[in-house]
Image (tube, rainbow, N blue to C red):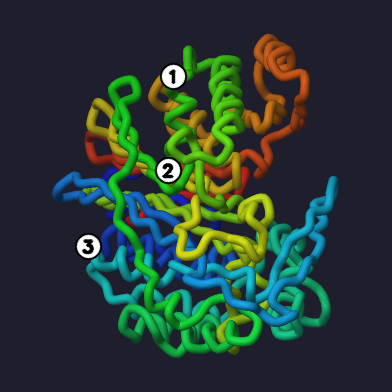
Amino acid sequence: MSGSRSKGVVAAGHRLTAEAAANALREGGTAIDAAIAGLAMACLCEPVLCSPGGGGFATVRDGGTGEISVIDFFPQTPLVHRQPGEKGVNEILVDFGTATQAFHIGPATSAAPGFCAGLQKLHGMGARLSLGELFQPAADAARAGITITPYQNFLCKIVAPILTATADAARLFAPGGCIVEPGTTFHNPGLADALEIIAAGAPGRNQVTDVAIAAQQADGNLTSADFNAYEAMERKPISLELAGATVHMNPLPAASGTLIAHSLSHLEGADPVNIARALLATSQARRAAEGDLTKLNQVPMRQKGTTHLSIIDADGTACAVTVSNGEGNGELVGPFGFMLNNILGEEDVNTHGTENWPVNTRLSSMMCPTLIEQPDGSLIALGSGGSNRIRSAIFQVLAALCLRNEGLTDAIVAARLHIEGGHLDFEDQFDGASADQLRLLCPDHRAWPEPNMFFGGVHAAMQDRDGNLSGVGDSRRDGIALLAD
């Protein structure tokens, strides 16, 4: 998908998300406007992955100056430890088919969300349309209803115990007792109200946050002080040279850019076996670091459900943005049709437990919205969902684009692998010799018979040296790319 006269290009994980972003470009907005409109729509059509109660990261390039910055609007641990009531934390089991996993939900599992602060920060970096104009399409769609896709139904069914943990949530996500089925119409007028209130108010407190704070009083950790103190932080990216290209990634306290840079530094060739060796070196170094971020990683890390948008407009402004809500804490924020995150309840993330987390700490993440400035003047925006696999997905696409000089589609479609703790997972579409060597390198391995969402979903947008725009949505995560003609 490409075009030379377009106002911009969008790649995202849902058609409605991409259409909302593309429409913002058509209406005269920049890539910043498009990102905001797309994220508002994602709260409706990708509710397991995106919510006003979560947060994320955006890597932004100013088309006029070429300056690149990262906006960190990820959740922050509460300022103080409170003593939540007995309903503060609840354990539920989620069935992934091959295994079950315990998750913790409830008011006390929520960290201070940064989603709204992040969108307001982005809006001040070059948006041309008002927040009201950017949010209204999502609000209108929430009232009119959208059609549930098979992929979104699949995600909802995985976390059905969370989406049905309370009566209010069950009425929204499982009317009649069943999770919303593919092809059915989903309405969320409460979310529409929330978006309109957020867009109309000043940054910070509003009716929506007041309701969220009130819901935390008895059983949660968050107070008005947490919402008042939260700031979206502008950071300098990790920028490194790769075969003449400059790659810009998420810096500390997020771990992703550091881990990808480590893998790149150990890469001796761009073939699958050398990629596996580099990922294995990073996996071993990460274990040896024992939590020290000056070596690799330090603070509690968020791992679960994520979605990504990549946008480049005709003027060369680019925005790669990745967001998450954990899985949601199981309780709707009053009548407003969304959940706060459950990030403090994820034991594989918050290893300190639901009661011993460090206060007032910006949580780390594997999310890594990335920009690439190539030697010929081309610009690429990309990123991925996929938990721990985000770092390996982006690392492999970088190697394909910059070292093997592959085209955008081939780089994203190519078979992927991931190594964690010495265990290798790989999509079994490598040539026979490479697959054999991978098995020898990691005797502890699992071959996946076809491409799978486990290995991330890299959605990418590109502007070539002549100004032509193109994009690719990763089919592993229902991706789509659209031109704003």
Q: Decide: is 100 above or below 396.
A: below
- For the N terminus, which image quadrant? top left
Q: Which mark is residue 234?
A: none
| Image coords of residue 342 (percent x, y) | 62, 66
The residue that mark 3 highlights is 126
The residue that mark 2 highlights is 382
Distance from disc 3 to disc 1, alpha carbons, whole Å, reads 35 Å
Among the two numbered marks 1 and 2 on one chain, the one whose residue lies closer to the N terminus: 2
Foreground pick, 136 / 301: 301
Q: Amino acid at mark 2?
A: Leu
**On the picture, is 74 further left or further right than 274?**
left
Among the two numbered marks 3 and 1 on one chain, the one whose residue lies closer to the N terminus: 3
Distance from disc 1 to disc 2, alpha carbons, whole Å, reads 17 Å
Q: Residue at x 47, y 40 (%)?
A: 293
Residue sitting farthest toward the top? 433
Element type where label 1 sits in the image? loop
The residue that mark 1 highlights is 404
Q: Amino acid at mark 3?
A: Gly
CB-based contact (under 8 Å), mark 3 and mark 2: no
| Residue 356, picture quadrant | bottom right
| Number of callouts | 3
